[in-house]
Amino acid sequence: MEFSELIRTGQAQAELLRGPEMPPLRGTLCVTGHHLLLSPGPQATPDLWLLLLRSVDSIEKRVAGDAGTITLRCKDLRVLQLDIEGVEATLDIARSIEALSSLESVITSFPFFYRPKGLRLGESWHFHPPERYYKRVARETRAWRLSEANEDFSLCPSYPRAVIVPRTVDDDALARSARFRQGGRFPVLSYYHAPSGTVLLRSSQPLTGPQKRRCAEDEELLQAVLAGARPGARGFIVDTRSAQAAKQARMTGGGTEAKSAYPGWKRLHRPLERGRPLQESFVHLVEACGDLEQSMDRWLSRLDGCHWLSHVKAALSTACLAAQGMEWEGACILVHGAEGTDSTLLVTSLAQLILDPLSRTMAGFQELIEREWIQHEAPIFLLFLDCVWQLGRQFPLSLEFGEGMLLALFDHSYASPFGTFLCNSEKERCLCEVRTRTHSLWSGLNQPKEQRKLRNPLYAPNPLAIWPSVEPQSLRLWQGLFLRWTHPPEPSEVAWEKVWQIATDQEKTEGSQPTDSASEPQP
Amino acid sequence: MSLLRGLLGMELIGISVRLFLDFQEKPASLDSALILDVPLGVISRIEKMGGATSRGENSYGLDITCKDMRNLRFALKQEGHSRRDMFEILTRYAFPLAHSLPIFAFLNEEKFDVDGWMVYNPVEEYRRQGLPNHHWRITFINKCYELCDTYPALLVVPYRASDDDLRRVATFRSRNRIPVLSWIHPENKTVIVRCSQPLVGMSGKRNKDDEKYLDVIRETNRQINKLTIYDARPNVNAVANKATGGGYESDDAYHNAELFFLDIHNIHVMRESLKKVKDIVYPNVEESHWLSSLESTHWLEHIKLVLTGAIQVADRVSSGKSSVVVHCSDGWDRTAQLTSLAMLMLDSYYRSIEGFEILVQKEWISFGHKFASRIGHGDKNHADADRSPIFLQFIDCVWQMSKQFPTAFEFNERFLIVILDHLYSCRFGTFLYNCESAREKQKVTERTVSLWSLINSNKDKFKNPFYTKEINRVLYPVASMRHLELWVNYYIRWNPRIKQQQPNPVEQRYMELLALRDEYIKRLEELQLANSPKLSDPSTSPSSPSQMVPHVQTHF
């Protein structure tokens, strides 16, 4: 396929409106294979405006007289309006954008063409290989080993090639357990909590079905987890569905762990929304935030009605529950819902941020995302970022990265010149040769010039667990994201810049380079 | 709400009651007896609950309602009649007015390094504003409070209005609160003038002197031939006030003025709104539908209206180049909110610690905001209809502004909370009495300590590390519900489930960074002195500290 087949017109004269606070841009509009370009001419600033077509979520067109208007709703919540001269030009451009922004193919996407100066291909993909973390855990504990049973993705296409499992469980048992779990996602280690010697595991639901089937190897695996922690250790299975929903899942072949089959493990149900209801909640919130005409008297109840903050609260409380189980009760925790790919990851990654000071560093956070998150498009990833933002608001010194980092992750998760968030599984990523043919987001973000926007100048390493308050009055709407395009965020940026000035002035006088752990080449 | 069990003891220490609880079963989180210092002034109401025959746990004891959003309940044992004594002592000292006892501030013998009473000197403040000038004069006509007993002694009025004119205008303004200058724009010389409502009444009375007087005010500004009048009230309330002799400036009588209503509700509405806020945050926070419950209190909506009104005043003066008259009914509640907030937006001086103290001292204290009636210092009549959280609402608006402009204010959140704590505590004389004349009669400045003495001798504690001094920057906060927040650290601070992050870790960390930086700069300078003895002109040396550290001079 050639992009040129999809591009209906060369160029047109247009005016771009970018929201209430930004001046309009006039110039020549042009569609390329991956971008919408507007060049206002050499004197203007900026001299070129670019929009990645993949970031267009929906497009509306209107024509009147001999001109047209295209409204673009972007995945980063921006709304852009283009006033274009010429009816034909408008329609052609709209058709081109529609066709190009909805291309499904991964290997024709922009990351495969993006070759920025100063970055070498293949560089920095080695920054955060999950194997490194697993090797460390295997070294530190006697109870865990690295397995290559999934080398060819035959056990589980969505797991990486290397996984970490109890030492006493062999690869055959893993294969059987994988067959007993939806999508092959058998219980694997997500995080090792050194202070208590306990572990956080994740998986998908067991395929018990209506007959309440059992799998000896799966039971053995979880038994081995407890035995490996310490004699008499207990375990909690945090099921992110309601007891009712878990039971109902049996009708479609799924289910949950029977009490009698897994002695030592206790099941807790903490229902978290995912999928459609979460998507709807997100859409309502975005609508409410973008609705500037609406009378603001009902703003709070409308915000309430979106339920987004209740999802934030539920996610954080469940993560706290998992973290408390480890830190306070010395218990092992297994988290799963149905597929084990959405709310499960939300809980395991938040629990780590609460417990693990390393995951709160720039490098550690990037590693956490590489390790835990395999799909980024659903609003569940945004929910994760929102929860992290709430943690950062409540513990302003404890995260090495700032709001800018979270916003960058949000933007890049939807549309990005980098390959990090492409594909939905490790297997796909290998097939598409993402690692050799695209640049990693981390190599982009870890460039020194980006760091000032992304890092928290006030960061002071905090060795303790950070327990967030989940009371409703402690949780806020993430204005920096949801109201980013409707209100100039200037004041907080001014403050941010000032803190940076102080922090870097200090470093200058110290005569040292900014500590830039994330971009340091790893041995 | 957590229950704590133990022996209750009580001790009056100066102006506080110290309540301590000796535990029978000690909660794990507390390692000694619980000591609770409650300023007696904060107590609004003390009630006995249950009687000698009451049965059931915690059914007998004392209930203490406080003015600062908390209630304390002490369940006591019936034996020994300890409750009667406790009740009597508490009532006596919490409500000294009812027992012909002095207010605590008069007994307070604290000493501070600075005298807070020296902070506000009206002549100096008006001089700072460039007054008097050839349009405005300072008058001492009210020196013995004969023109208006709730106004300060010193007033700024149009040069062209004689003292006789002022006396005649006073007859047409509620409580004789004539239009006087609050603030003048340093460049365009437009002014903010405050007053009470005109006494129009049902018959639509007019007063030539008042009309002429407002016209004289208008004429001090030649840029625009209209005077803008902001009536803080909702239109209907202003009309209703005619029935009791009040009203507003009609178009017929005041040709050269435009009148706008700002829809801010009266003290009773605000009191009820805050009561609802208390209901949803204490003792338990309304968990389900938190935001909807918050909305139903209308508190943030009132905040929004007050801020919106002040923004209009500020914008009219600054961009509209029109002089502005602000009034409500008596001109001591909503008017004070509007003028002081507008002045805070317009004049960066009031955003410093001292400037803010002066603003409060001037627009609120000297111009007769009825602190004694609104707060009920030492008074046992907790249900008095004159009580209302108008000043708290003002401080809340200031907090909202400081959230939106994190670098614009020299003071931090703690400063605002301390002001509110001592609004009730009666430890200082600052907020006592309703007006300047009453304060003078009681010799408050001689016999009590000023709150500003406490604050100004510990200034560092109240400083905002992000403060960047900017002259002439006008702040327009966004008064949209989306950008207003409930002030959780104030309204919900007593909730045991809210984690207090005290002192503010960001401020502390920032102070650390600043201190570190200063230390490094010093060390660098020392090194440079040691290394280059022949260092000639520092401005040409690339390694001079002034270039290495470009912003050293600008902070603090």
Image: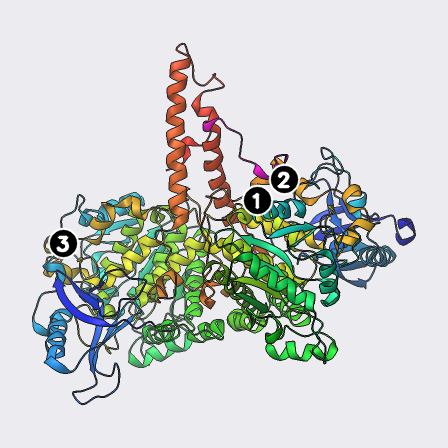
A236 shown above or below A96: below
What is the magenta range? A510-523
Q: Is the magenta region chiefly helix, strand or loop?
A: loop
Horizontal side of B158 relative to A500 (left or right) equals left
The numbered disc on residue A413 is none
Residue A511, position as x, y percentages in the image: 48, 26
Please tell me which residue lies in front, B152 or A44: A44
Q: Chain of mark 1?
A: A
| Contact between labelled residues 2 and 1, with CB atoms less than 8 Å apart | yes
Residue topped by disc 2: A446
Quarter that holds the C terminus of chain A: top right
- Residue furthest to the bottom in view is B53
Mark 2 belongs to which amino acid? Asn
Number of numbered discs: 3
Which badge, 1 or 2, is on the more N-terminal residue? 1
Please tell me whether mark 3 sits on a helix, a strand or a loop: helix
Cα–Cα span, label 3 and label 2: 61 Å
Residue A76 shows in the view = yes
Please tell me whether mark 2 sits on a helix, a strand or a loop: loop
Residue B454, position as x, y percentages in the image: 21, 50
Please tell me which residue lies in front, A395 or B88: A395
Cα–Cα span, label 1 and label 2: 9 Å
Residue topped by disc 3: B445
Residue topped by disc 1: A362
Cα–Cα span, label 1 and label 3: 56 Å
